[in-house]
Each structure stands twice: as structure tokens, then as C-alpha cells.
Image: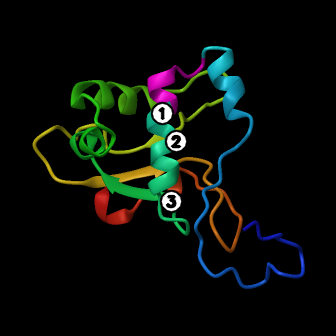
Amino acid sequence: MVRLVTSESVNLEKPQKLNYAPLLRGLKDHVIDGRMNAEEFTIFVWLVLTANPFTGVVYTNAKIIAGQMNKNAASVKRALKSLTKARHGVPDGYIYYDGNRGFGGGAYPILVLKYPRAKTGSRTTMKDYPQEAR
């Protein structure tokens, strides 16, 4: 059975859940022109999907992501490090985290930069990195 969704059947003022993730369409251009490789793209999309919709922050690490995505932890760590680097059109990188974190520690905050926050729609910046993590 197919249910037709109309503007009348969806209450846009009060969403039941924030069960969607904001992914900018221009991201595909970053892959096409080489600013982001396939591994970085995969990890970045995973971070966007798992980020807190109100803050744009994910508490995780390379080992956790590798386990969740069935990937090699070293390649995830390389992709995370690469996603923090500035490149053409992306002056601060795609994410920010304390780069001194290693394999041995627990989860740490990773901020998805320019993440459009739920409710306000404002985008995250470096200033939004959790204070307790600094």
C-alpha cells in the first residue's frame, strides 16, 4: 500500500522527530573536483548522520567509527585528520577536533563545521567546539 504524503498531512511546524540529516548538495562537487576523496566523503557523511542535530557535535573516535562502519581504524584516523585540513573553498576544513587524540583514549568531540543546526538553522563554527574539550 502506498501512502500519499501531502502538505496537509505533514505538520511542518512541529516535526515528530529530527530524523533527517542536513547534507549540502555542493558536497558532490568537492568529490568531483578532488577536494575530498571517497574515504573522506564516507566518513564525513557518517559524522553528519550521527551528529547531534542541535550542536553538530559527535562524541566518537577513529576506533569507534571503524567498528561501526566495518573499516580499518588507521584509514579512518587518516580521513579524520585530512578532513580537518584547509583546502580550496574550505578554509577551516570540514570538521574540527583536538588533533592530539590517539587510539588509546575514549570518545572525544568532533565538530562538523558549517553544520546547519536544528531549530535555529545557524551554522556551526570553530567557536562551537565544546568548552570542556579544550
Q: Distance between the residues labelled 2 and 1?
A: 5 Å
Q: Which of marks 2 and 3 is in front?
A: 2
Q: Name the residue under label 2.
A: 45
Q: Name the residue under label 3.
A: 128
Residue 40 drawn above or below residue 37: below
Total numbered labels placed on residues in the image: 3
Rendered residue at 16%/53% (across/down): 106
Rendered residue at 72%/68% (across/down): 1
- Whether the residues at callouts 1 and 3 have beta carbons within 8 Å, the answer is no
Amino acid at pointer 3 = Asp
Mark 1: which secondary structure? helix
* Image location of residue 91, percent across then percent down: 61, 31
Q: How far apart are marks 2 and 3 (CA)?
A: 20 Å
Q: How far apart are marks 1 and 3 (CA)?
A: 23 Å
Disc 2 crowd rating (10 Å Cα; few below 14, some 14-19, many 20+) is some
Q: Mark 1 points at which residue?
A: 42
Left or right: residue 124 compared with residue 24: left
Magenta residues, start to end: 35-41
Rendered residue at 60%/53% (across/down): 115
Q: Which residue sits furthest left? A: 104
Query: Residue 85 versus residue 7: which sits nearer the camera?
Result: 7
- Whether the residues at callouts 2 and 1 have beta carbons within 8 Å, the answer is yes
The answer to whether residue 122 is seen in the rendering is yes
